[in-house]
Image: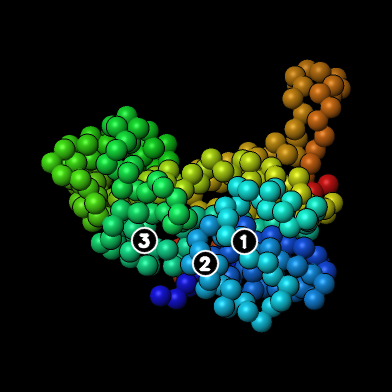
Amino acid sequence: MEFKHIPVLLKETIDSLNIKQDGIYVDCTLGGGGHSLEILKRLSDKGKLIAIDQDISAINWSGERLKNFKNVIYVHNNFYNIQQILKELKIDKVDGVIMDLGVSSYQLDEGKRGFSYMKDAPLDMRMNRDSSLSAYEIVNQYNEEELCRIIRDYGEENFSRRIAKFIVKAREESPISTTLQLVDIIKKAIPLKFQKEGHPAKRTFQAIRIEVNEELEILNKAVEDSAANLNTGGRITIITFHSLEDRIIKSKFKMLENPCTCPADFPICVCGKKPIVKIINKKPIVPTEEEKSINPRSKSSKLRIAERI
């Protein structure tokens, strides 16, 4: 299956990087290579792109797509490890970092990966197929309280308690092994009158996917490490797809812009913590109505940008 992914906010994202022809850039989420391709088009032979993805399918497919470019280094890893990755490549500072968070169109459309609540598949949801934890373990082994917590906190689902209870009850009879089995349980747990807006399984599937891939846990460290490895004037640009991610990025950027921990009534700063970045856009950039109509998956996307000072 073709690793297709329509990059959202493509022009806005690439423009936000202020790409220098001889600069070094990191695409933390290579995916289908859409953003990487546009970065490479703007680089000279002296420029360099480090393309990271934890999904080997993305590395393989995009490697073929970008095979005419000789100044790209592919890294099969999680961008949580960006500090170590750059160290191993003997790269001290870079001129830009991009993160396109969330699940790719390919991962959603490839039924057997188990990301989609629209297709029957084994419960998996691993972006890194070498990972030991899959959706199957979470659904069948987490206790009711743990299930309730992740569905509530990561899915922002109002019926998290009922869904967790229904999952536990269903698996007492036999293991829950497929996506549509889980969808059926979720539909039974949510009263019909509350199933009118969007798919009833959307929030729960999001929650389980986040837990499987530790998506939120890695963000704070990854953003901080990325900013620390930027040259002065270098940009970090991040696309989020749900409110949990966006709140984390907004908060982290604010902290990096104003890290002072002194009480508000102190006349001068005594903690010694200096600003690392300046926030470029106080309000996130969102897709145009035209883009949303062409690519419905872009609807919830937000772009935030910060620059190293």
Q: Residue at x 22, y 36 (%)?
A: 168
C-alpha gap between disc 1 and disc 2: 11 Å
Instruction: Please give the name of the residue rendered at 54% of the width and 55% of the height, measured from the top-left corner.
Output: 101
Q: Is residue 28 visible?
A: yes
Q: In the figure, is residue 261 to the left or right of 145? A: right
Disc 2 residue crowd, few under 14, some 14–19, many 20+, Cα 10 Å? many
Q: Amino acid at mark 2?
A: Ala
The residue identified by callout 2 is 58
Q: Is residue 277 above or below residue 258?
A: below
Answer with the quarter of the image where residue 94 lies: bottom right
List the single residue furthest toward the bottom.
68
In this rendering, the label closer to the viewer, 1 or 2: 1
Residue beneath the point at 74% across and 25% down: 261
Q: Earlier in the sequence, mark 3 or mark 2?
A: 2
The residue positioned farthest toward the left in the image shown? 173
CB within 8 Å, label 3 to label 2: no
Tell me if mark 1 has few (under 14), some (14-19) or many (20+) residues whose alpha carbon lies within 10 angstroms of its own. some
Task: Report which residue position mark 1 lands on.
Answer: 75
User: Residue 13: horizontal and vertical position, in percent?
Assistant: 65, 63
User: Between 262 and 55, which is closer to the camera in this rendering?
Assistant: 55
Q: Quadrant of the N terminus?
A: bottom left
Q: Is residue 78 above or below residue 75?
A: above
Sooner in the amino-acid sequence: mark 1 or mark 3: 1
Cα–Cα gap, marks 1 and 3: 21 Å
User: Can you identify the residue that label 3 sits on?
Assistant: 113
Residue closer to the observer: 71 or 14: 71
Query: Which residue type carries mark 3?
Result: Arg
Residue 133 in percent (x, y) is at 40, 46
Q: Secondary structure at mark 2?
A: helix
Instruction: Please say if 65 is above or below 169.
Output: below
